[in-house]
Structure formats: structure tokens, C-alpha cells
Image (spheres, grey):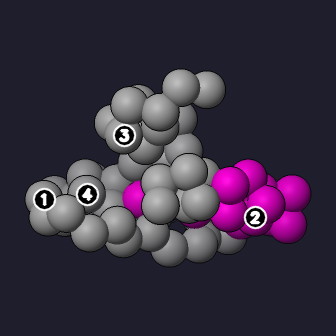
């Protein structure tokens, strides 16, 4: 499943979107697409809300997936 999410994020990127991954502390995968123009603002809001949100590179590391 994590590789599928990373592949989807790679597909979204040239279309002007990023896929953000939310670590809920459970065993589910939760991710959502976000327009690139809103990325910095969304990351700032997530940080203030105390959410652990990862972009593709950090998600790859947290899931122990080789590049």
C-alpha cells in the first residue's frame, strides 16, 4: 500500500498537486492531495494543529522503503 501511495503522489506532482500523508498513530494510511500553491500554508496549519504530516520523502523513510 505505501508504494501505491508514493506512485500516486509521483503521478500527482506534474499535475500541480502534492500528496500529504498524515500519521494518525494507527495502522491505517491516510493521505490527501493538495495543490502545490497551498503546500506551505497547509504544512504550517498542520504543525500548529499538532498533526504529523509527511511529504513523500519523509513518508518513504518512515515506511522504510528504499528509493
Question: What residue is drawn where x is 79% and y is 60%?
Answer: 11
Determine whether 40 is above or below 66 in the image: below
The reply to whether dot 4 and dot 1 touch (C-beta < 8 Å) is yes
Q: Residue 63 carries which label?
A: 3
Callout 3: SS: loop
Task: Compute the Cα span from label 4 to label 2.
Answer: 20 Å
How far is mark 1 from mark 2, CA to CA?
A: 25 Å
- In percent of width and height, residue 63 lies at 36, 40
Give the label, 4 or 3, closer to the camera. 3
Q: Is mark 2 on a helix, strand or loop?
A: helix
Q: Position of residue 55 (x, y in %)?
A: 50, 47
Query: Quick one: label 4 or label 3, which is nearer the N terminus?
Result: 4
Residue range corresponding to the magenta coloring: 7-21
The residue that mark 4 highlights is 23
Task: Categorize mark 3 by other alpha carbons within 10 Å: few (<14), some (14-19), many (20+).
Answer: few
Q: Is residue 51 left or right of residue 10?
A: left
- Decide: few, some or many residues near mark 1? Use Cα within 10 Å; few <14, some 14-19, many ≥20: few
Q: Do the residues labelled 4 and 3 touch (CB within 8 Å)?
A: no
Q: In which quarter of the image is residue 31?
A: bottom left
Q: Name the residue under label 1.
A: 25
Question: Looking at the image, is 62 positioned above or below residue 32?
Answer: above
Per the rendering, the mark at residue 12 is 2
Amino acid at each position: 500500500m505505501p508504494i501505491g501511495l508514493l506512485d500516486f503522489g509521483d503521478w500527482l506532482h506534474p499535475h500541480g498537486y502534492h500528496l500529504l500523508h498524515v500519521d494518525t498513530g494507527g495502522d491505517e494510511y491516510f493521505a490527501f492531495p493538495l495543490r502545490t500553491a497551498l503546500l506551505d500554508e497547509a504544512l504550517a496549519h498542520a504543525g500548529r494543529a499538532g498533526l504529523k504530516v509527511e511529504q513523500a520523502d519523509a513518508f518513504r523513510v518512515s515506511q522504510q522503503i528504499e528509493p
